[in-house]
Image (spheres, rainbow, N blue to C red):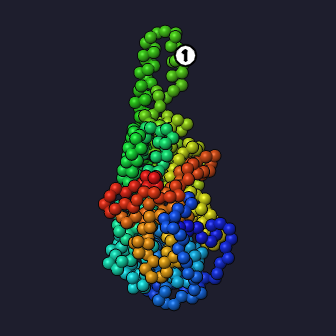
Amino acid sequence: MLVGLMLAGCGGQTTRQPAPETRVQQPRQEAPAPVEDSRPVLSPLPDRAPEDEKVRIALLLPLSGDQASTGQALLNAASMALFEAYDPRLVLLPFDTAGERDRTREQALNALNAGADLIIGPLFANNVVAADEMVAARGIPVIGLSNDRSIAAPGRYVFGFAPEQEVARVVRYAVERGHERFAALIPAGRYGDQVERAFTMAVNRAGAEVARLQDYPPMAEAVSDPIRRLTAYDSRQAELRAERQALEALNSGLVDPILEDLADREVLGPPPFDAVLIPEGGALLRTMAALLPYFEVDPEQVRFLGTGLWQDDVVLGETTLQGGLFAAPDPGPGNRLLARYKELFSGSPPRIASLAYDAVALAAHLVRTHGPEDPFSEERLTVPGGFAGVDGPFRFLETGVVDRNLAVIAIEDGAFTVAAPAPGVFRAPLVAPGDPIPDGEDAAR
């Protein structure tokens, strides 16, 4: 059944038992939908767990190096989930990958030697592959925190927020609201390649038109010319000059009001699209959003669309993004998790901290439901109804892709609001290995 992972602290107050000392160790070196007729029968938790009932969850994270602060935040969030689940059979084993492939391979072997039953992490795509290469022969599943679906494989799950699903969800929503001609700014690099493929496929599937595509180097000083080209600014300006010349050649007072109106314009006509995707975040997103009106793209007439990178308070103050839309988890549960995190750790974690929380909460649920004997089998991970976490409904496909149902978020009056909630039910059948993978909204239908 679709299983809720909203644990203690997500709603009202919950009485917590004290956490046993052995639970975290340093290693020696929308609404639930049933898919079964009844809820699983859960046995009571023991006060103590014998050694043969211990379930060891290895966390492979960059706890040193350039991404150490992110790795520590992920470890903190994972510890929160473990404490709130309170199951003395569970043990977290953190391993420092330093964000390096060779170190990751070494630490994956250390996790095996420590008796790991499940690996959560690493954070980067190439490290996820490296870890899986070390443990796949032993049948240990890896729940990688990367968002690169190209590395997904049976037993190697990609748990991050995939841009393909975000793009598919927001494009479909825009088409349903009457937008027909789509443009996109495509950042150079692998992420941009993912976005472009997903965007083109989503627009075509929805029966709309890809009107313009423009790549750009992701640097603030280099985006002006690409945006100018995307908006067809020069050709629209040339059309305006030609129109003025044609009217002036008439030499008639009847056209004077028209010429006066054209005198105040920079270009003739709107851009060749009514919705534009800007898959950026932070300061660069704000720069690009401001440049679009500069090149005569009216946010009142053209809908600005984004990805989950928009889910950052820094964008709320950008005037031109008011009314913009993007696909992401409903921010409510995530915000409550972040608030609890701040109380415990006196700091603001990155948004992806929720991934580590949900992964550990899922592991706790599977042990609670199935017991410590092989709780992370493919059959148990890939239940068709999926699970519900802080980041909304999700399910594991046999291909290794993690399918998510996302909300559509609008920026209105300087705040994030839910324009359309995430579908609470996965209705499409599981995808066989090698078949095309449904994205977000398609999967929910």
Q: Is residue 436 left or right of residue 72?
A: left
- Taking the image as drawn, is residue 176 in sight? yes
Residue at (41, 40) in percent of width and height = 208
Q: Is 365 situated above or below 395?
A: below
Q: Position of residue 4 (x, y in %)?
A: 55, 67
Residue at (37, 71) in percent of width and height = 155
Q: How many marks?
A: 1
Nearer the observer, 267 or 378: 378
Nearer the observer, 26 or 429: 429
- Say what amino acid the circle numbered 1 marks: Pro
Based on the displayed image, in which of its 4 quarters is residue 323 positioned? top right
Residue at (65, 66) in percent of width and height = 11
Based on the displayed image, in which of its 4 quarters is residue 18 positioned? bottom right
Q: Is 389 situated above or below 203?
A: below
Label 1: which secondary element? helix
Q: Work out which residue is located at the far top of the displayed protein and give it.
A: 252
Q: Is 375 situated above or below 336?
A: below
- Taking the image as drawn, is residue 230 in sight? no
How many C-alpha atoms fall within 10 Å of the one at disc 1: few (<14), some, or many (≥20)? few
Where is mark 1, residue-wise? 257
Nearer the observer, 38 or 42: 38
Q: Position of residue 316 (x, y in %)?
A: 59, 50
Q: Position of residue 5 (x, y in %)?
A: 55, 68
Residue at (49, 85) in percent of width and height = 54
Q: Is residue 288 left or right of residue 129?
A: right
